[in-house]
Amino acid sequence: MLLQLCTWQEIERYLECSKGVIVPIGSTEQHGPNGLLGTDAICPEVVARGVSEKFGALVAPTLSIGMAQHHLGFPGSLSLRPSTLIAVVRDVVQSLARHGFERCYFLNGHGGNIATVTAAFSEIYAEKSFSGGNNHPRIRCKLSNWYMAPGVKQLSAKLFGSSEGSHATPSEVSLTYFAYPDAVKSAEMSPKLAPTGPFYDADHYRSRFPDGRIGSDPSLASVDAGRQLYEAAVEEVARDYHEFLKAS
Ligand SMILES: [Zn+2]
């Protein structure tokens, strides 16, 4: 059930049975020589839609631009500042809360969003705490990274071992190829395995990681690996989402 394909009356009826919603959140940023700019938004979106198809969860529109300042040295990358993303997440949660949603499950595809989205949740709770007394609706937010789910991590390790790396990984690229097989790209990786290490701003990132990858060899990506990762991620995320709904 996709929120953008429902009428307001359908959402009103849904709220009589569930107070939960999945909000996919990602980024639009470079993903190395063969990865799509939309990788980090596409991955949580397709997993959330899989959970919706199999288990009837409601999925909100994807927040597809995240906190990716360190990728701005590469054309096509888009970023919100941390303060902007905090404002976006707050406004989305408060819109949902106004209608009676109480469990907002952010399914994330981008490591660079974690600190900022977590800070946004703290802002939302702080607003409740400082206003005192009126704690209704009882908003609970959770950030879950699809690629960190234990079953997904195990499968990534089995499929790609030490070639997985941490940015422009063969796992995430595979999942986008499964979702959009017409967009599969091929490119030579040089060196085969990208360098690793810390980064700060956009210029620093590009000087350390000239083709955009960190520690990975995404030339190993395939539609078939993407299908396996999709199936594992849908199972894991569905389980985690239902536990989140049950928790008090
Ligand atoms: Zn990514």
Image (cartoon, rainbow, N blue to C red):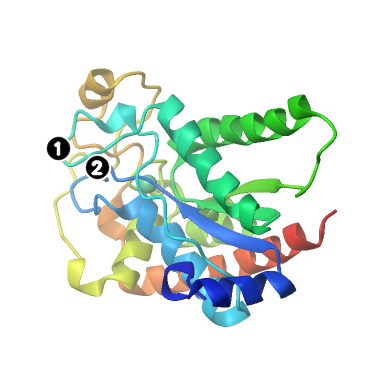
Whether the residue under disc 2 has CB within 8 Å of ligand 1: no
Q: Position of residue 79 (x, y in %)?
A: 31, 34
Q: Position of residue 62 (x, y in %)?
A: 42, 56
- For label 1, the residue is 75
Q: Residues within 10 Å of mark 1 (few under 14, many from 20)?
A: few
Indicate the amino acid at tag 1.
Pro
Q: Which mark is residue 206?
A: none
Residue sitting at x 64%, y 51%:
97
> Residue 73's image quarter?
top left
Residue sitting at x 81%, y 39%:
134
- For label 2, the residue is 30
> Residue 25, relative to residue 185: is it above or below?
above
Which one is earlier in the sequence, the residue at label 2 or at label 1? 2
Alpha carbon distance from label 2 to label 1? 8 Å
Secondary structure type for disc 1: loop
Q: Position of residue 197 (x, y in %)?
A: 39, 25
Q: Can residue 28 be seen in this snapshot?
A: yes
Indicate the amino acid at tag 2.
Gln
> Residue 145, relative to residue 88: is it above or below?
below
Secondary structure type for disc 2: loop
